[in-house]
Image: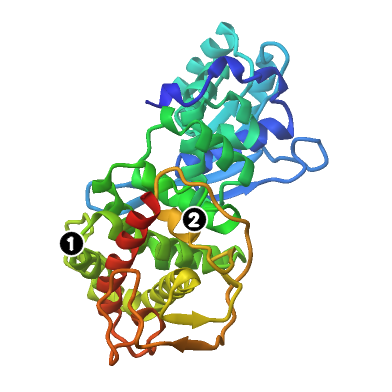
Amino acid sequence: MASGLVVPSAIHWETFKGERLENLLYWLLDELGAKDLVWRAGSATGTAADGGRDIEATFYLSTPEGGFSAERWWVQAKGRQRTVEQVAVQRAVLAADPTVDVVVIATNSRFSNPTRDWLQKHLRAHPRPNIRLWDKDALERLVVRHPSVVARLTPEALSPQGRLDAARSRFWNHAQLVGKKELETSWNERFDLSFDTEAMVALTVAEVANGNIEARPWPMELPRDAHLKILLTLALNTLPLALRFEQIGAGTDMLAEAAAYLVGVALVSAEPEAVVELLADPYQFADKSDSHDGARAEAFRKIALPAIIERFRRGLAYSCESDCVRVSASAGKRVDGRWISPDDVSFFDRWRQSAEGAPAGADIPEETLIIEDLRKPCRAGLTLGRESSCPLFASEDMAWESLIRQAATIIRTRLDERAR
């Protein structure tokens, strides 16, 4: 499938010289799994002696005993308009530190046959370090398999599927969100794209952070049997993703908001009990061979779940109340990054397919005056009497499991109402 993600002919290799070529090599090594990457600043411009390498990297290889062995790499970039001169390769090889395991000489052009013949003869006499030549063809084969590298440096060479794959990789590997323009483009191309749950989480989080989930409700474009899997994917990764976002100085509210939205997505298609079971312990459904991790499950319940449930409850409460005859709260609320005005229930369009959305806004106020007329019925399908309060505005002590079960009825009733 990777061959369909990048259009090789759209990569203008003649422009990859100096720092641009080193930039490509740095991110390519990162995608290949290199650790301890060091880009020796100034080597491309001649302002600093490169000491035989432009980039240093370490690969940790598994051993038969189950451990890891460190393999040190030096990488030199040789950006050229024509074939790399043999003397440049000879100098790079002779300058290599014998304690290094692999030396890569990479170019955007080619190496001559006499240069390759000389290198083979040299390696027979000096097998260490191992010298590898990456010419334009070798680099092209590598970057085609790693669209996120192409996305950084020459995004015009990506196919629509390649852009989606790169967005997915940037989110999960570097905690980088898709921008508004890219979201709009991918949405228009969605019928030609193939999604997995990780790509869907990346798009959903980005949409919640800087878009409008009512206008582009990504998960609703997938079959109903995928909805619970998408929620599971984010639930399993909420805490590690939050840590990664914090490490780069980004906020983590978007993760809770996206998870709250995905709770509603799951309730549209799955039984409430299945959603309750997943949220109570997502790790029991993890695809792994080792024993169940009770510590991580407890951390999810204590740290992530309360924030997810509260955002889910508040968003549902203030949108449902907008035309409720039983409950009245302060008019004009801002919920989950969008504005809710009186008689506006378009919030529920986030759980419909390809719905139109509403303008963006900010969070709802912490304190809101709430008046409930216990004599009036619930138009969202709940059986409420004079002694029963609306669960969406109930005390925070209310069991979240009960809230989820009743929220399923509310969402489905509201969607049926808006479909008529």
**Kind of residue indicated by mark 2:** Val
Q: Position of residue 17 (x, y in %)?
A: 72, 26
Q: Which mark is residue 174?
A: none
Q: Is residue 37 visible?
A: yes
Q: Element at badge 2?
A: helix
The answer to which image quadrant residue 309 occupies is bottom left
**Kind of residue indicated by mark 1:** Asp
Taking the spot 22% from the left edge, 66% from the top edge, the residue there is 272
Above or below residue 113? Residue 70 is: below
Q: Is residue 378 left or right of residue 116?
A: left
Q: Position of residue 380 (x, y in %)?
A: 34, 69
Q: Which mark is residue 205?
A: 2
Q: Element at badge 1?
A: loop
Colouring mode (rainbow / by chain / secondary structure / one colour)? rainbow
The answer to which image quadrant residue 405 occupies is bottom left
Taking the spot 62% from the left edge, 41% from the top edge, the residue there is 55
Question: Mark 2 or mark 1: which comes first in sequence?
Answer: 2
How crowded pointer 1 is (Cα within 10 Å; few <14, some 14-19, many 20+) is rated as few
How crowded pointer 2 is (Cα within 10 Å; few <14, some 14-19, many 20+) is rated as many
Taking the spot 49% from the left edge, 81% from the top edge, the residue there is 328
Real-space CA distance between mark 2 and mark 1, rounded to the nearest whole angstrom: 29 Å
Mark toward the viewer: 2 or 1: 2
The answer to which image quadrant residue 320 occupies is bottom left
The quadrant the N terminus occupies is top left
Residue underneath mark 1: 290
Closest to the observer, 165 or 33: 165
